[in-house]
Amino acid sequence: MSEFMSCKICSHPTEPFARALVLGRYQAEFYRCGSCGFICTEDPYWLDEAYSTVITGSDVGLVRRNSRLATIVHLLLAVFFGSSGRFLDFAGGYGLFVRMMRDRGFDFRWFDRYCTNLFAGGFAADMDDGGAYDLVTAFEVFEHLVDPLTGLDELMGLSGSILLTTDLLPEPAPNPHQWWYYGLEHGQHVSFYTRKSLEVLAEKKGLRFYSNGSTVHLFTERKLPASLFFLLARHRTASLIAPFLGNTSLLDDDFSALSGSKLS
Ligand SMILES: [Zn+2]
């Protein structure tokens, strides 16, 4: 592995930042960009193993996380994007978020290369239909991307607006053992972003960037009031306002459609 590597976001030279044991047995080098602060691991040769390791029943936060995100996305869509569009949850996992958003009246579709759709059966996206979604959500995707620019390209092929979650690096950048988000035990997190690195990423793709300052971020072609996004993309705000947003659930329609398709 070369000691010199250019930043995957801004192309500046990076420097070795730290070494840490990934998956309990691979000594991995972490590189940090002196310009945008982006941190990545060396070429993650351990990924096959990282993804083949089954983590059973340990994700106790799954429901709460999806519930909080549904509240935030409900508000952001209602305020900035309208309720009647087509939406896609990219890397949608078990489909829980898609089901929650359809219950809230938003036409969300599911896509995930690696996970089984348990909750959003009948609403898998047709990825060959040319995309054109009003917004794509990509929760906990970007920290898995070995090549963030290519990953963003794929999402931009689906929509001009990408709402993502990834935890921003604290400042100063913590060492691998000082921040849980490095995920050394599972080895699946390989890219770690500062706010600046996400801004550069947006700029490179001709997109605007908005953030709640911690975990929820938006790449979009549209111009939005940054301070309003900052305020609304927080669970504390969203949980106060979302209950008052009227929207007709798709639950009954979905039930009829799925029952009909089973009979036919
Ligand atoms: Zn950089």
Image (spheres, grey):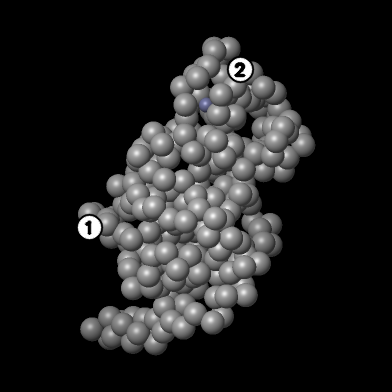
Near mark 1 (Cα within 10 A), the count class, few <14, some 14-19 or many ≥20, is few
Residue for badge 2 = 15
Residue 7 in picture, x, y percent from top left: 50, 24
Tell me the residue at 54%/50% (across/down): 211
Rendered view: 134 above or below 142: below
Instruction: Judge left or right: residue 66 versus residue 263.
Output: right
Near mark 2 (Cα within 10 A), the count class, few <14, some 14-19 or many ≥20, is some
The kind of secondary structure element at disc 1 is: loop
Instruction: Judge left or right: residue 255 versus residue 140.
Output: left
Which of the numbered marks, if any, corresponds to residue 19? none
Residue 158 in picture, x, y percent from top left: 31, 52
* Circle 1: residue type: Asp
Q: What is the distance, in whole Å, between disc 2 and disc 1 at their CAs? A: 43 Å
Task: Mark 2 or mark 1: name the one nearer the start of the chain.
Answer: 2
Instruction: Judge left or right: residue 7 versus residue 135.
Output: right
Tell me the residue at 57%/47% (across/down): 166
* Circle 2: residue type: Glu
Give whichever of 94, 215 is nearer the camera.
Answer: 215
Residue for badge 1 = 129
Q: Is residue 207 visible from the viewing direction of this image?
A: yes
Rendered view: 200 above or below 96: above
